[in-house]
Amino acid sequence: MGKFLTEFKEFAMKGNVIDMAVGVIIGGAFGKIVSSLVNDVIMPVVGIATGGLDFKEHKLILKEAVMNGEEIVTPEVAMTYGMFIQNIVDFLIVAFCIFMAIRIMNRLKKKTEEAPAPAPEPSKEEVLLTEIRDLLKQQNEKK
């Protein structure tokens, strides 16, 4: 049991797992922002552009509700294609935002990769050969 817990601790504390957890949390918050953007900003504009239509309310009723006075005996069966359209818009906005974020990250990564790498340190052999060369030069200059 002790080995199992040790292995689990090593797994849970790996950088990738923690990074993924942070990503999921931020992704959830980002999803709320995107949903608000779609519901509160984009869809009203789309509704105006389409003559005041509210996509959320659009549906195709396959079977009417059975009513007994004010009481619903059997609810209606409907395809809510308006919600489907809204979800497609949500997806497109999220996909576009992720595309832009990855594009920016790739550009930043490319800039750091393009930066010239510092010259590598000379090996011990190169240092020794340089010293020998310098000593030979000094001996030739003395002559």
Image (cartoon, rainbow, N blue to C red):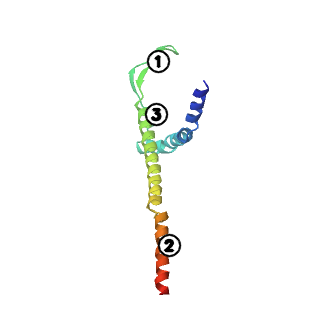
Q: Sort mark 1 into few (<14), some (14-19) or many (20+) by Cα contacts within 10 Å.
A: few
Q: Is residue 98 above or below residue 58?
A: below
Q: Residue furthest right?
A: 2
As measured in the structure, the alpha-carbon distance from the residue carrying label 3 to the one carrying label 1 is 18 Å
**Does the image show residue 120?**
no
- Which residue type carries mark 3? Lys
Write down the quadrant of residue 1 in the picture: top right
On the question of residue 59 being in view, the answer is yes
Which residue has dot 1 on it? 75
Three-letter code for the amino acid on which mark 2 is drawn: Glu
Distance of mark 2 from mark 1, alpha carbons? 93 Å
**Label 3's element?**
helix
- Farthest bottom residue in view: 143
Residue found 44% across the figure and 33% down from its top: 83
- Between residue 10 and residue 109, name the one nearer to us: 10
Vertical placement of residue 116 versus 35, above or below: below
Counting from the top left corner in percent of width and height, residue 142 is at: 50, 86
Which residue is identified by label 2?
131
Query: Which tag, 3 or 1, sits closer to the chain's start?
Result: 3
Disc 2, SS:
helix
Q: Horizontally, is 1 left or right of 62 in the view?
A: right
Residue at 46 percent across and 47 percent down: it is: 97
User: Looking at numbered disc 1 in the image, what kind of residue is underneath it?
Assistant: Pro
Of pointers 2 and 1, the one earlier in the residue sequence? 1
Q: Residues within 10 Å of mark 3 (few under 14, many from 20)?
A: some
Q: Nearer the viewer, residue 110 or 83?
A: 110
> Measured from the top left, where is residue 26 in percent x and y?
56, 42
Q: Secondary structure at mark 1?
A: loop
Describe residue 83's horizontal placement relative to residue 3 as left or right: left
Of marks 2 and 3, the one in the foreground: 2
State which tag comes first along the sequence, 2 or 3.
3
- The residue beneath circle 3 is 56
